[in-house]
Amino acid sequence: MARITASIKKELYKTEIHSSSGNLLIADEPETVGGKNQGFSPTELLASSLAACTSATLRMYADRKGWDLEEVKLEIILEVNRDEKRTEIHRKIELIGNLDQAQRDRMLAIANACPVHKILSGTIAIQTELKRN
């Protein structure tokens, strides 16, 4: 279970995000919508989660197998079509190293099994409540 807290004060759109493990991120909106671009936008954070999880999952798998994977490069493009209420995520993976085609095919299957990929491609329910002061 991930536990995240976030707070925003008077500065427009700048949000401090804290993890239960003690890490801090700053999220913001681009200047074009009134932010100061001091951090990742919320949409960039979502795409980043998939990129980070995919990268780490592939690295761990290749290490466990003893495969010659030097580097994983990812590009995530997240497109939201508000009219159709549809979101598409395009993920491009570049595997750098001495891997044969069977290993590359397996790495693609592993990428599709990373935990964040499973979350995003499954059913998501969000329950929201207001805290009482």
Image (cartoon, rainbow, N blue to C red):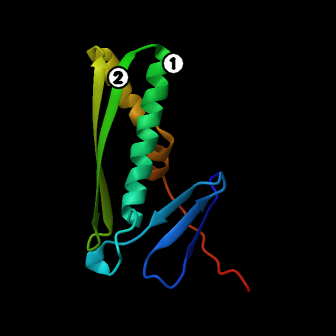
Q: Earlier in the sequence, mark 1 or mark 2?
A: 1
Secondary element under disc 2, as helix, strand or loop, is strand
Q: Position of residue 52 (x, y in %)?
A: 43, 43
- Horizontal side, residue 5 vs residue 37: left or right: right
Q: Position of residue 9 (x, y in %)?
A: 54, 81
Q: Residue at x 51, y 59 (%)?
A: 124
Q: CA distance from mark 1 to mark 2?
A: 14 Å
Dividing the image into 4 quarters, which one contains the C terminus? Answer: bottom right
- Residue 64 marker: 1
Against 63, is 123 above or below?
Answer: below
Amino acid marked by disc 2: Glu
Residue sitting nearer the eye, 9 or 93: 9
Residue underneath mark 2:
70
Among the 4 quarters of the image, the one containing residue 93: top left
Count of numbered circles in the view:
2
Among the 4 quarters of the image, the one containing residue 6: bottom right
Against 112, is 30 above or below?
Answer: below
Q: Nearer the viewer, mark 1 or mark 2?
A: 2
Residue sitting nearer the eye, 56 or 84: 56
Q: Residue at x 32, y 69 (%)?
A: 85
Q: Residues within 10 Å of mark 2 (few under 14, many from 20)?
A: few
Amino acid marked by disc 1: Arg
Among the 4 quarters of the image, the one containing residue 79: bottom left
